[in-house]
Amino acid sequence: MIGKFLLMFLFSSILLVTNGQRIPEGLYVSCANAVVRQSCSAALDLAFTEGRIRRFTTARQYIQTKGCKLSWWVDTGILRIAQKEALQGALQQIDDYCTANGVSVINPTNLPGRGVYVGQMVGNQYAVLRAEMGAFA
């Protein structure tokens, strides 16, 4: 618990304001093998339109479309997402991390691509958004 608090203190997230929209700044972002936003935008749109991804709970929820599986959850409580831009910003941060680490295009190999965003999307509550492409576990 102290480690989590210390980590949150040391790497506190800041919501950036761009064109009047709040963009999430990740506490932790990772990427492996491929950028994810292009392949996972359709899954995000579907999940948001259906209202499924507007409510993060401690239960791991997911949606799977052709080529992408999105999973989302929070450690405690419930997080309500009103704007899709916060979620798109999280996917963009995963891709930015990929690009910064030399993964700038969708990987043409059969290796699955995946990315994780942990950070504040709304308010002070931390959430996890995980994107996977390829073979799903």
Image (cartoon, rainbow, N blue to C red):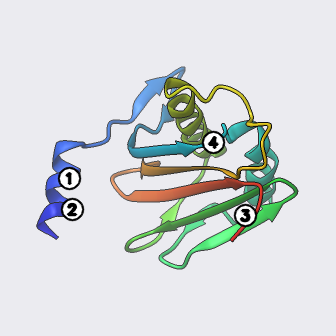
Q: Is residue 99 left or right of residue 76?
A: right
Cβ atoms at labels 3 and 4 below 8 Å apart: no
Residue identifier under label 2 = 4
Asked which quadrant contains residue 10, the reply is top left
> What residue is disc 4 on?
33
Tell me which label, 3 or 4, sits earlier in the chain.
Answer: 4
User: Residue 50 vs residue 121: left or right?
Assistant: right
The amino acid at mark 3 is Gly
Which x, y percent locates residue 129?
A: 55, 56
Judging from the image, what secondary structure is the residue with disc 1 in? helix
Q: Report the mark closest to the observer, 3 or 4.
A: 4
Q: Nearer the viewer, mark 4 or mark 2?
A: 4
| C-alpha gap between disc 4 and disc 2 | 28 Å
Question: Residue 80 versus residue 131: which sits nearer the camera?
Answer: 131
Of the residues under marks 4 and 2, which one precedes in the sequence? Answer: 2
The residue to which callout 1 is attached is 7
User: Are the residues tagged 1 and 2 within 8 Å (C-beta)?
Assistant: yes
Residue at mark 1 to residue at mark 4: CA–CA distance = 27 Å
Q: Position of residue 111 (x, y in %)?
A: 71, 50
Residue located 45% across and 59% down the image = 127
Single out the residue that lies furthest toward the right: 66
